[in-house]
Every structure is written in structure tokens, then in C-alpha cells.
Image: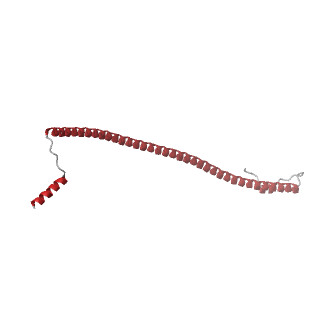
Amino acid sequence: MDIKITSSEIKGMEFSKSISGYKKSEVDSFLEEVANQVEGLISEIKNLEKQIQEKDKELDNLDEQKDLLRRTLILAEKLKDETINNAKNEAENILKDAEISSREKVKKAKDYLSILEHDFINLKERKMQFCINLKARLNSMLEILEKNIEQEPPEPEKKSNIETKEEKKHKDEKDS
């Protein structure tokens, strides 16, 4: 607010004199009173303007703090979302890796089982072939033995080793 008349202008105001004019002392007293009130009002206006400026600064400061809080909340929300997304992605990756790893282990186990089954079948076949070959050889040997028995005349019974030793002993005694 711009005041065009100051209290000193009011106090220094001079009016022209007329014959039937106002009493100078009353006019001066009134002007003094008006000047004092104007001066008080101007002082009060300046104080109020100063308070308004301080409140404006406080409001600006509060607006800055409000803006800072808003930006902080937005940033915190973004960080929360990023953290949640990162955690979800990491969990998904861990699950995928675990699934891939378990599939690989199952595949390896199945491959190993297949190898063992193949080896088992081979061993069974080899055992069967061995048994067939052994049976054939045993049958062949049995035939040979039977032919030998049929072709050879029975041998006289041999005396046991003990008798032979006794005979030898007798013989040695006779010879001595």
C-alpha cells in the first residue's frame, strides 16, 4: 500500500487564513491527532507487511518442505517398487535356475539309469551266452568221457596208495 500523504506533511500543512475561518489551535490539534494516527497506521502497516513477508517466507519454506516430502515419497515409492520388482525377478530367476538344475539332474539320472539298464541287459545276455557255452562244453566233455569209457576196457582195480607203499616196503626189505 502506497500512502501519498505522510504524517509530517499533515503536521506541516498550512491553510490560508480567512476572516471567518476555523480556530487555528483546533485545526492544528486535529491535524496533530490525524498525523499521529496516520503515523501509527503507517507503522502498523509496515509491521503487518513485515509479518506478511515473514509468513510468506515461512509458507515458501513450508512449500519447499512439502515439495521435498512429496519428492521423497515419490522416490521412496519408486524405490519400493524397484525393490519389489527386483526381488520378484530374482525369485523368478532362482526358481528358473532351480528348475533347470533339477531337470538337468533328472535327465542325468535317467541317462545313467538307461546306461545301467543297458549294461544289465548286456550282462544278462552275456551270462546267458556263458551258460549256453558252458553247457555246450560240458555236454561235449561228457560225450567225450562217455565215448572214452565205452572204448576203454575196464582196468583192474588198483590198490590204494597205502598198499602200494606196504608192498614197496616189503619189496625193499626183501631186497636188502
Rendered image coloring scheme: secondary structure
| Residue pictured at 66% horizontal, 51% vertical | 62
Is any atom of residue 135 visible in this view? yes
Determine whether 44 is above or below 146 in the image.
below
The C terminus sits in image quarter: bottom left
Total marks placed: 0
Q: Is residue 153 above or below residue 176?
A: above
Q: Please identify the residue farthest to the bottom as the structure is shown.
A: 176
Residue 44 lies, with reference to residue 103, above or below; the image says below
Image-based side of 56 in relation to 78, left or right: right
Examine the image and state in which quarter residue 140 appears.
top left
Residue 128 in the image, given as x and y percentages of width and height: 28, 38
**Which residue is at 83% across, 57% downward?**
32
Q: Quadrant of residue 174?
A: bottom left
- Decide if residue 6 is on the left or right side of residue 124: right
- Which x, y percent locates residue 113? 36, 41
Towards the viewer: 53 or 105:
105
Instruction: Estimate the x, y position of residue 76 in percent, counting from the top left.
Output: 57, 48
Q: Residue lying at the far right in this picture: please name it.
A: 20
Position of residue 153 measured from the top left corner of the image (x, y, whole percent): 13, 40
Q: Is residue 13 visible to us here? A: no
Closer-to-camera residue (4/72):
72
Q: Nearer the viewer, residue 36 or 57?
A: 57
Give 73 or 38, whichever is nearer the viewer. Answer: 73
Of all residues shown, which one is farthest toward the front?
174
